[in-house]
Image (spheres, grey):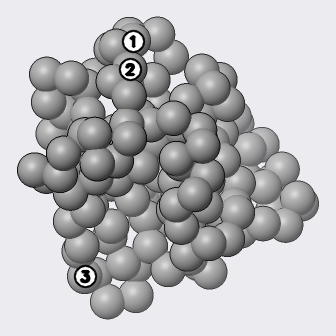
Amino acid sequence: MSIHPHSSHNQYFIYCVGQSPYQIAAFKAAMATSCVGAKALIGRYHGQYEQSFISNMKHFDLIHPWLSGEESILVIHSFNARDEPKATLHYLSDHRREYLGRMIAVDPDYALSQPAYTYDPRYNNYFICRPEGYPRSAARGRYVPTRAEV
């Protein structure tokens, strides 16, 4: 998976800090000053396009103040042998968790037809969350070999 390199010992989270260009620029500057990795992604959540980021979960406390207007974050964890992590929505207001399955790479056309997806512009890959046991062919997904670069 190219969103982040495989690591069975780390958790990452995908989040949005709002859609204001000023807010996004201020966030990027703050993360650069703090030496915190915040890789830019593009996604759609509840049918709305958004600029999003991925960071190591160990930086959550530093990033949390930037999430004030957000409903949830997507935590990715427990990578399998195909480098497909489990994906769990963590709701910020009531601390509920909703397990979504595995995050898998899919064809762009299929991702764009979904109400939610993540796009990694660095590697030109699209990802969706697929429930465990859901046939890969049913999601018209394509397997993307593991990449160690990020």
Q: Are marks 3 and 2 in contact (CB under 8 Å)?
A: no
- The image quadrant of residue 125 is top right
Amino acid type at circle 3 is Arg
Q: Nearer the viewer, mark 3 or mark 1?
A: 1
Amino acid type at circle 2 is Val
70 over 76 or under it: above or below = below
* Label 3: few (<14), some (14–19) or many (≥20) C-alpha neighbours in 10 Å: few
Q: Depth check: give the residue in front, 126 or 86.
A: 126
Along the horizontal axis of the image, is 49 left or right of 103? right
Along the horizontal axis of the image, is 32 left or right of 79? right
Which mark, residue 105? none
> Percent x, y for residue 19?
78, 66
Amino acid type at circle 1 is Arg
Identify the residue at image location x=67%, y=71%: 48
Q: Are marks 1 and 2 in contact (CB under 8 Å)?
A: yes
Q: Mark 3 highlights which residue? A: 96
Q: Mark 1 highlights which residue? A: 147
Q: Nearer the viewer, mark 3 or mark 2?
A: 2
Which mark, residue 144? 2
40 over 73 or under it: above or below = above
Identify the residue at image location x=33%, y=24%: 143
Along the horizontal axis of the image, is 52 left or right of 103? right
Q: Secondary structure at mark 2?
A: loop
CA–CA distance in space, label 1 to label 2: 9 Å
Q: Secondary structure at mark 1?
A: loop
Q: Residue furthest right?
A: 22
CA–CA distance in space, label 3 to label 2: 31 Å
Identify the residue at image location x=55%, y=75%: 46
Q: Secondary structure at mark 3?
A: loop
> Percent x, y for residue 140?
38, 41
